[in-house]
Image (cartoon, rainbow, N blue to C red):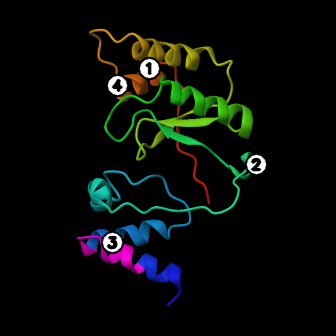
Amino acid sequence: MSSLGHVILQYLRSIQDIGTAIELVQYVLQPAALPPDNGAHQRLFSALATLPVLEVAVFGTVDPSDIVSTVSSLSDPNNHLFFGTDASHALRTWALNATQQGVDWAELGTSQQIVEDVSYTNADFNFVLNNATAFIQHPGSTIVSASNITSAFGSFQLLKPVPLHT
């Protein structure tokens, strides 16, 4: 067995529920797929939070020209808002300037819709971003979450289906 095959086998063995492991393999082997949703991939969707982490190391150089797309959730794994933070602005600047690809923003990693951020000139996108940034810099009594931001993007009709990559 190859080293990669051994790693994959060990990973699949670490998944508690065999049905979830089978559904994960079937999902990965699809030629192109949206993130798993609560319908067609019910078992896999429900198990996402419990799947073991798989870390990948890259040796060598990854140049901006190697980047096909940049995707980010609006919040971090602890549900703290990422969109509008200094780090999100740095990611956006890098994606727009260095890779010239922009950022696809999604409420969650499993979201079926994204907002394509491909320039600094989209007034509606900038309105939502500026308000999120203002909230982070000067938090008040208003609660702003990834869900609020997604709703704002929806009101400007900026949400689009996740593109299928093969």
Estimate the x, y position of residue 30 in percent, counting from the top left: 50, 67
- Mark 3 and mark 4 in contact (Cβ < 8 Å)? no
Q: Amino acid at mark 1?
A: Ala
Q: Amino acid at mark 4?
A: Ser
- Inspect this view and state whether residue 123 appears: yes
Checking the image for residue 152, the label placed there is: 1
Estimate the x, y position of residue 103 in percent, counting from the top left: 60, 36
Query: Along the horizontal axis of the image, is 148 left or right of 112?
Result: left
Please tell me whether residue 6 is drawn above or below residue 30 in the rendered image. Answer: below
Asked which quadrant contains residue 81, the reply is top left
For label 3, the residue is 21
Q: Marks 1 and 3, Cα distance to the nearest angstrom? A: 36 Å
Estimate the x, y position of residue 146 in percent, counting from the top left: 38, 29
Q: Nearer the viewer, mark 2 or mark 1?
A: 2
Sequence-earlier tag: 4 or 1? 4
Specify start and end residues of the magenta stretch as a single range: 9-18
Q: Nearer the viewer, mark 1 or mark 3?
A: 3
Q: Marks 2 and 4, Cα distance to the nearest angstrom? A: 33 Å
Checking the image for residue 95, the label placed there is: none
- Inspect this view and state whether residue 100 appears: no
Q: Nearer the viewer, residue 154 or 6?
A: 6
For label 2, the residue is 65
Q: Under tag 1, what secondary structure? A: helix
Q: Amino acid at mark 2?
A: Ser
Q: Nearer the viewer, residue 43 or 140?
A: 140
Q: Under tag 4, what secondary structure? A: loop
Q: Nearer the viewer, mark 2 or mark 3?
A: 2
Query: Does the magenta segment cover residue 70?
Result: no
For label 4, the residue is 145
Q: Marks 4 and 3, Cα distance to the nearest angstrom? A: 32 Å
Give the residue at x 46% y 24%.
154
Sequence-earlier tag: 4 or 3? 3
